[in-house]
Image (cartoon, grey):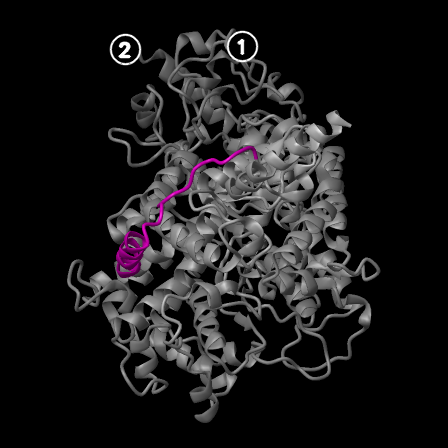
Amino acid sequence: MSSYPLAVGCLVFLELCLVSAQLDLPPVQNPASPQPEIYYNGYTPTTPAQITADRDRSQRYGPPYTADSGGEPLGSADDGLDDFRYGQTYDERMRLGYAYPTPRLNFSHDRAESPFSGDRGYTNGGAERYANHNYGTTDRYGTQDRFNNYPLNDNDLNNNNNNGRNAGGPYTTSNPYNPNEPYSGNPNAEFVGNRNRFENPFLPNQDRFNLNNRYLERQRFQQDRRYQMELEKLRNLLVETDQKGSLECTANVAAQWNFETNVNDFTQTEALNAQQRYVEFQRITAQQSKHINKDLIFDRRLYRQLMLQSEVGPNALPLDVLDRYNRLLNEMLFLYNGAGICAYQQPFQCDLHYIPHLKDIMAKSRDWDELQHTWVEYHRKAGRGMRDSYEQLIDVMQEVAYANNVTNGGEYWYLAYESGNFRQDMDIVWEQIRPLYESLHSYVRRKLRDYYGPDRINNIAPIPSHILGNMYAQSWSNILDILIPYPGRKLIDVTPRMVEQGYTPLLMFQLAEEFFTSINMSAVGPEFYRNSVFEQPLDRRVLCEPSAWDFCNRHDFRVKICTDINQRSLISVHHEMAHIQYFLQYRHLPKIFRNGANPAFHQAVGDAIGLSVSTPRHLQTLGLLQRSLDESSYDINYLFTMAIDKVAFLPYALALDNWRYDVFSGNANKRMMNCHYWNMREKYAGIKPPVLRSEKDFDPGAKYHIPANIPYIKYFFSTVLQFQIYRGMCRDSGQYVPNDPRKPLHKCDIYRQPAAGNLLKQLMAKGASQPWQEVLEETFREGRLDGTALREYFAPLEEWLRLENLRTNEYVGWNYDGDYCKRSIETAGLQVFGGYYNGAGKHLVHALLPLIGLWLSLLAFN
């Protein structure tokens, strides 16, 4: 092979790198200048203006990690605004993009030059300086194409039409760029098909950073001394950017902390301004990172740092489109928050809202007609009015996808999971869990049929969604009184013992710290106890949703929680301390890596610790249980209460975001998207609406995460992953032995097991510095999400359900029993009011047919 192309390439690249190394970053607040005062446990009077400020708090300025809201069953994956434990970190919101403040601060600085940059401040992408090198085209938003390939052969050197842009780099396909291919006018042509920009690192003979066939030439090229000097400049630049970003993040988090621990007009304004500045800082940093030619970077860690730093989500949009995006979200959230209905059979009492009224009705009422009225009216008021706005949002999400270099909104929706087949992977995981869910579903359907009667619930049909104790049928814990397998066996509740033994919030956190130090993890230190908020102050308003806070400075970590003295709070305290441990373990990393391996990891780790703390064995160790509960009936009741919360939740989470994937990617027609939603609910969960629906409705919009545009798939992921993490820790510590009835998984307690803590530290210390598949492979020797751990945990319950369904001759699974949704209300007919479109209703219709015939005959005779 001729060395001429390589030599010319080196000369061009060396001249390219003679410029100074700096990014055009916004000015950072001088550390010597006054910083925002941080409220610790001091008290300041509040104003009543923000009483409802926590309605959309997690979207505007929510804390990094949040836990369960109060008043729900332990571990409940409940609905709407109370999914605060699933809140995003600030970095996730900035990268994946949900509603941000639209005004942008004006950092008026000229674009500076940086090594590896494709834009040197010259017009026309720098073409005047190097006529033989193509620096990439300008995309649809006026920013330069990120694929600025370096010319490595004669064809590239003589070609100025950017045909070489697909020649290499981690984002490109193996096929050369073909201007005649579909999407050739789209800067994302290389993403056509199901490929995501991240390849699966575990496919054989594949390195996702070296996918092009010119790697050997580039390997020789990168050994050049000048290249190494410029690469060092880039590393130094990233260190500087990381330091500035940490300062901006600290100022932002401090302002959010001030607001959430002292709610008033002043702290809210400061919080909004601080978040606005931080968003703008990240946007500018991301824009500069995009202009660095990543094809010339072969260091995996450095490459990943640049890529994560380049992701800004909707903030990549032009300002007018971003304003439209935020306006659509605000319009939908306004309708959602204002949805109120009239009480059942009380037409003049029309001020019932989801929180607290309707949620309480769905949980406690056992009146079929009242539940149906509540469900139908709320979905009509909350969802139907936002349908037009959501159809517009679908179009804007396509723009967001293009701006982030993916082909469609569906691929963008799963972008954070770094897999080209993520949806298919999650479907595979669901198929692993589905046999357990079907057995649980069949048992629950029989118990509800016994309660409400066979005329309302068919023995082989899906279950109507309004009778499961939850507006969205995503958790069935509220109807435990109907479903519990052994009613005579009480569930474990150590709350009276905690009160009797004088437990305090401080003592509960000290117990949680001792739990982690017993497994060879870190102590939190006195600063944590001095700065955190453990109780509700008496003279100021605090947003009480449990949350863990990382102040981005590697030493200040806090928890905010209004602790009650009960069993639920004991587990929540351990959950929050797990987040603090995560912060401590990855604090040595650059800020962009100080996060979970994907959006689900933080939550999964906290829930895995909760599985251990809630075992009877651990409660006995704490002296809160005086006797062992080894009877199988107690085990079945305990596992059943876990299953109707965690297992029942999985198909809802999967159906909701697979539905969004379909509408964002164009696989589902916007004119049929409500019917598609119910098809997904029936397919995954065996759930149907209580009455016939039409395309005039928009039932997904009754769920907060739809108008707020918050991804939901991470809830599915974290629920499955927590059992995988728990199994790994229990297995390595010897507390779980597969197929050994003396050491079942659901009784494992990792307390005082250093082997479990060492494994957890290994997972936490990687942060987001590696793809999550690699993190799981290196930690647990399992390179993918695995549903078998959940099946192993619930194995005793699954066997009990199998025998119980056999005993009662219950049909396992469900059959489609008629249309649940029609294109128009006219085709739905009167059934939309009665709801008798299911199998049970058909018997009633058949019974009435002779009477209708007799009545018609009498009319004809007269």
- Picture coordinates of residue 224, whole percent (x, y): 35, 30
- Picture coordinates of residue 618, whole percent (x, y): 32, 77
Q: Earlier in the sequence, mark 2 or mark 1?
A: 2
Q: Of 756 and 32, which appears nearest the observer?
A: 756
Q: Which mark is residue 460?
A: none
Residue located 56% across and 33% down the image: 819
- Residue 814 forms part of the magenta stretch: yes
Q: In the rendered view, does 430 fall on the left or right side of 827?
A: left
For badge 1, the amino acid type reads: Asn
- Picture coordinates of residue 525, whole percent (x, y): 45, 78
Q: Of 123 and 468, which appears nearest the observer?
A: 468
Q: Do we see residue 127 in this rendering?
A: yes
Element type at mark 1:
loop
Residue located 51% across and 53% down the image: 474
Element type at mark 2:
loop
Residue located 42% across and 63% down the image: 606
Q: Which mark is residue 1?
A: 2
Frontmost of labels 2 and 1 is: 1
**Which contiguous range is marked in magenta?**
793-819
Q: Of 202 and 751, which appears nearest the observer?
A: 751
Specify the quadrant of the image occupied by residue 112.
Answer: top right
Between marks 2 and 1, how big is the CA–CA gap?
Answer: 23 Å
- The C terminus lies in which quarter of the figure? top right
- Picture coordinates of residue 696, whole percent (x, y): 71, 34
For badge 2, the amino acid type reads: Met
